[in-house]
Amino acid sequence: MKYQQAIITGASSGFGAAYARRLAAACERLVLVARRGEILNELAAELKTDYPGLEVQVKVCDLSAPEARCGLIAELKSQLLSGKTLLINNAGLGDYGELASATAVRNAAMMQVNMLALVELCHAIAPLLKAQGGAIINIASLAADLPIPDFAIYAASKAFVASFSEALRIELHASGVPVLAVCPGPVHTEFGQVARRSGCSDGAAPFKKWFYSTIPTVVDGSLRALERGKARFYPSLKIRMAGLLVRNMPLPVLRFIMGMRPRKVTATHPES
């Protein structure tokens, strides 16, 4: 696996930081995008120390803000080098709680980051990929296959990501540009704490410990799946079987099961 450059959103922690560390040896240049500039700069310094000669660009950008995204895309178009490029759309937001008690600002931010930012970056980078080669990894979720009460917008946004990735894969197939939708189940990252609201007991869905995957399992496995030309990646047999079961389950049965799912939130309004 060798790319001239990789663009990674949500690179300050979790999957994004892990992709950056994993790809540092396989790229000439990394473009790291996230809101938290201090953490991005620390990661960039670490990577440049560990991999002399690696170029690392830090792009501090709030992907929930349309104006900020426009600026980012303009910079990328003007500064990207020629050559094989890997785009990893990893940035994502969640909000655990009932829709009725959510804030409009948080709802809009989730949809902007999880869907619009991803589409706009794919749209901006796709011509470069078609002309010079490369690939796209979009981080979806096992939630893409589920309507999840108390997590309705997030799950719906990940269903969008999965469907969009499948369609984009078909469009780019003739150009030899693979598109991979990564569908992890629960993973211990900062995501749960960021998505947590007041009234939520632990900021996470009620999964057993054995159902969790690790960050390296998801990152390393997804890169191998991309090399093999896979359309979707599930990080373990149990996650893959859960997805298969859900996708083939009659909708009335799925509704019943999700209706019986333990609720871990109250109607408390989220903190602003």
Image: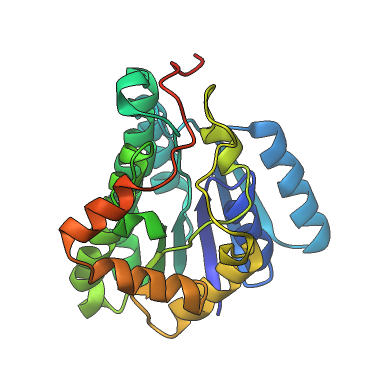
Residue at 48% over, 52% down? 90
Residue 257 picture location, percent across and down: 31, 54
Q: How many marks?
A: 0
Residue farthest toward the bottom in the current orientation of the protein: 228
Asked whether the viewer can see residue 127, the reply is yes
- 106 w.r.t. 201: above or below: above
Residue at 36% over, 69% down? 243
* Displayed quadrant of residue 262: top left
Residue 120 picture location, percent across and down: 30, 45
- Would residue 188 be found to the left or right of residue 179 on screen? right
Residue 264 picture location, percent across and down: 49, 36
The residue nearer to you, when weighing 86 against 116, is 116
- Would residue 217 be found to the left or right of residue 105 on screen? right
Asked whether the viewer can see residue 139, the reply is no
Residue at 31% over, 27% down? 99
Residue at 41% over, 30% down? 97
- Would residue 24 be found to the left or right of residue 120 on screen? right
The residue nearer to you, when weighing 2 against 189, is 189
